[in-house]
Each structure stands twice: as C-alpha cells, then as structure tokens.
Image (cartoon, rainbow, N blue to C red):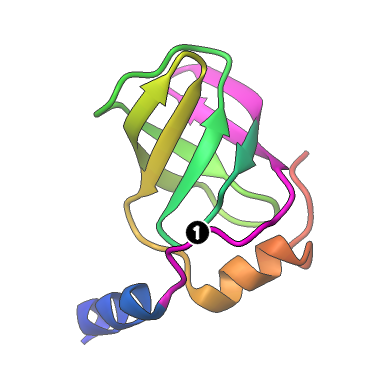
C-alpha cells in the first residue's frame, strides 16, 4: 500500500522545472561534506553545483533546507555540475514548501 501511494504521488508530481531561485543545501558523499548550490529542483531530481567532479552512478546524500538527508544518484555530470535523481521522490507539498522557503534553512 505504501509503495502504491509513493508511485501515485510521484506520477502526479511536477517533472517540469518551474522557475525557482537556486538554494543552498548540504552535500555528503563518504567523508566529504560541503555546502552546495541546488537548482532545477523537481520532486524526483535536481541540478547541483559541486566542489568535486562527480560521475554518473555515484550515490550521495543531499540535505535540502529544513529536510532530512535524501539519497540521490548522479544521472549526468558536466565538470562540477551534476544532475541528481532522488531515490524516493519528494511529495509535491514538500516541494512547494521548499520552494516557498517554509522549511527552514541549512546550517
């Protein structure tokens, strides 16, 4: 039942990118931890400016403002910019709250 609900809201979630400002997030891969800039955020993906060259297939943890860390996989990379796909999509209401700045900040 839970899996069905996850698929249901993932299909309803906006996959097209709506103009939203870039935001700061926390990035963790192995022992490396850093602040990064995230843009083009959708329920299931994001674009991240990183401090290292990531390769497709790498996994990492991304903490968006006010949320718990989300597991993500690198889908593509171009230099220090990478496209991420979340292991579990954000709920549309959570995405709206992140965009609206109603989830707090990353310290």
| Quarter location, residue 104 | bottom right
How many numbered callouts? 1
The residue drawn where x is 39% and y is 62% is 89
The quarter of the rendered structure image containing the N terminus is bottom left
Tell whether position 28 is magenta: yes
| Quarter location, residue 59 | top left
Compared across the picture, whether 82 is left or right of 105 comes to: left
Tell whether position 32 is magenta: yes
Provide the secondary structure element on which disc 1 rests.
loop
Name the spot of residue 94 as percent of width and height, x first. Answer: 58, 71
Location of mark 1 (residue)? 42
Frontmost residue, 59 versus 18: 18
Q: Residue reaching furthest bottom?
A: 1
Name the spot of residue 90 as percent of width and height, x first. Answer: 47, 65
The quarter of the rendered structure image containing the C terminus is top right
Compared across the picture, whether 80 is left or right of 15 comes to: right
Q: Is residue 24 above or below residue 32?
A: below
The residue drawn where x is 60% and y is 62% is 18
Q: Is residue 67 above or below residue 50?
A: below
Number of other residues with Cα within 10 Å of mark 1, as a class: few under 14, some 14 to 19, many 20 or more: many
Frontmost residue, 33 versus 82: 82
The residue drawn where x is 58% and y is 78% is 93
Q: Is residue 101 above or below residue 61?
A: below
Name the spot of residue 37 as percent of width and height, x first. Answer: 66, 33
The residue drawn where x is 21% and y is 83% is 4
Name the spot of residue 49 as percent of width and height, x first. Answer: 58, 26
Residue range corresponding to the magenta coloring: 13-36
């Amino acid at each position: 039942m839970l899996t069905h609900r996850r698929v249901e809201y993932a299909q309803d979630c906006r996959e097209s990118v709506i103009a939203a400002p870039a935001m700061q997030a926390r990035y963790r891969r192995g022992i490396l931890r850093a602040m990064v800039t995230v843009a083009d955020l959708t329920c299931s993906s994001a674009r991240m400016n990183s401090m290292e060259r990531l390769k497709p297939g790498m996994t990492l943890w991304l903490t968006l403002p006010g949320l718990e860390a989300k597991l993500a996989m690198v889908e593509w990379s171009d230099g220090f910019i990478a496209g991420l796909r979340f292991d579990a999509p954000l709920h549309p209401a959570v995405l709206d709250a992140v965009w609206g700045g109603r989830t707090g900040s990353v310290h």
